[in-house]
Image (cartoon, rainbow, N blue to C red):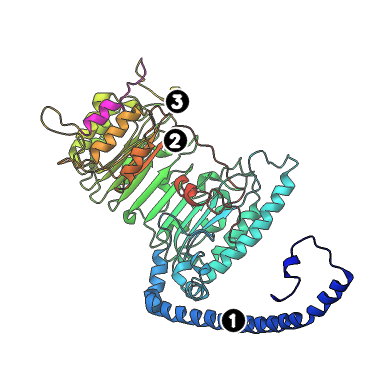
Amino acid sequence: MDSSPFSSRIGTNYSPTDEELVQIRNLLPEPAAKLATLQKDMDRIQDIYKDLARQHEALSRDIEGHRALLTSPIRRLPVYIIQEIFTRCLPTEHNPMMSRHESPVLLARICSGWRHIALSTPTLWASIYIVIPSGVTLGVYPSSEAWDDWMASSLDVVHKRTAGVKEWLGRSGGCPLDITIYDRQQSRQTRFHLYDSFIDAIIGLSRRWRKATFNLPSAHLRRVIELAESDVPLLQSLTIRGPHADNEYFGGLLPASTFWMDSKIIRAPCLHDFSFSKFTEDPAKLPLKWSQMTSISLSDVGWGSQANMTLSKIAWLLQSCPQLVSCHLDVTSVAWEIETHSGKTLIRLPHLRRLCIHSGRTDLSSFFESLEVPSLQHLKFHTCRYGPTAALLSLLPRTGTIRSLDIDPHFLSREDFLRCLQHCPRLTSVTIQTSYHIDDHISINRPPHEPPQILDDNFLNLLTTPDDHGNILAPYLEELECYKDAFFSDTGLLEFIKAKNSCMIGVARLKRISVAFERTQMTPMVEEIVSLLKGGLQVRISYDPRISTVPSFPVSYGLSDTFIDAMFHSERDPSF
């Protein structure tokens, strides 16, 4: 419409006359028709473009799919190799939880192909970690108004979780089973049927049990305890952790004196790993096949039952287990008297590699003198007795094989602590933590003053600086954990880490360090620590006590704090 006589008037405030209005109306029909034609052409071309775009997208999808077949090696792997990879994805520090956040449930949520493979691989479902949801929680007891609501919530979770357990184990085929059941509360207030639901889910599979761990009160395990030897032909490991059955505590239901001594399950033909905590019975009277035991753990002796774990009984127990590889024992004394071991009988344990002793107030000097442990590599020794140097120094000089030492130097002088380290020339790991049950009324030989500050910058210097003879204390040290009495300065700790990682001749590089300070941070060192992490160093340094909230019924109860921190502190929706 460039020839329109009104072109110059467009966009102005010009008001046409009546005659001009007629002229304008006569000009519009032809360009309007042309506009309609152009719109039709545009719509047609747009349809063509959309069709071409759809073809392009479909063809691109097909091409990318075919390229994926060429560039994804895992697609070419045989199913049995994928199954092996899946199996190696299972957690190694605990049985798999019923959670979508880790294998095997996680593997079944990737794609339909992987789901089919995961669900049809029995070994993925042959181990399980079960948490019992208890209605007893902080501030919620039968007398409280919230009790009924909590119990209803517990029962709802129980029904769903037991159904999940049955479905899980139903996928395990005929594989040997590793089962852990954990109750966080372990309280007499928890109703029996909460436990019975889970026991029902696993008791029928007892012939396939290989490892069984029960973190439950013993009173709720009577059906397990009554299993015959023939009911558990594959059982190799049995762990019992939880309050023992007490006749008065559990309303006279069971006689505590013969609860486990009459057990049949611990006579299992293949049982060689036995762990029992919070017990009240005499372990010497348990019908275990002591001669085939390779791992024994007897800890947390019940109050009023100290006579069952005296030093003389411990000596007898060790003499009865010549195949021991790992041993964890709590040694108690009778009637608050100090018991000593005569040391006349040699206790030879040629295969023992790991020894953990909590000695209370007992003097273990003569007992350690009786030990012959040529293969010992890991020693944990905690006591409530001040001045236990004689006990340690009667053992350490005769081994020479110790690689890890876990001790509380609170009961040692600085000189004695350093002597202990000097007697461990192959030491690669040192852990400093508090001995449990430390209290004034159960500690003897207390010095008239507070123990010296052993773990200070001077101690760190000894680990990196040669003495007058050119020797460095614990030159092969790779791991240092200190959870008590850490008097290092921030600067001193940082310099120690740098020195250990400076490729010093004859000094091993530090792989892991964990320090818990009971103070606030004085010197910022995050940036320098981060630069050291690039070399693979693991560092955990804490200053303030950590307060964490725990969900009501998470499937991760009972696992290590580190593992929970990494993955499950925020979990509130279990997979089952």
Estimate the x, y position of residue 282 in percent, counting from the top left. Answer: 44, 43
Q: Is residue 442 above or below residue 373?
A: above
> Which quadrant of the figure has residue 49?
bottom right
Q: Which residues are magenta?
A: 449-464
- Label 3 neighbourhood size at 10 Å, few (<14), some (14-19), many (20+)? few
Looking at the image, is mark 3 or mark 2 nearer the viewer? Answer: 3
Q: Is 22 on the left-hand or right-hand side of 175?
A: right
In the rendered view, would you say 530 is above or below 161?
Answer: above
The residue where tag 2 is placed is 306
Residue 145 counted in the magenta span: no
Closer to the camera, 235 or 227?
A: 235
Q: Quadrant of residue 318?
A: top left
The residue where tag 1 is placed is 49
Indicate which disc residue 247 carries: none
Q: Where is residue 439 drawn, in percent x and y?
A: 45, 25
Residue 559 in sight in this render:
no
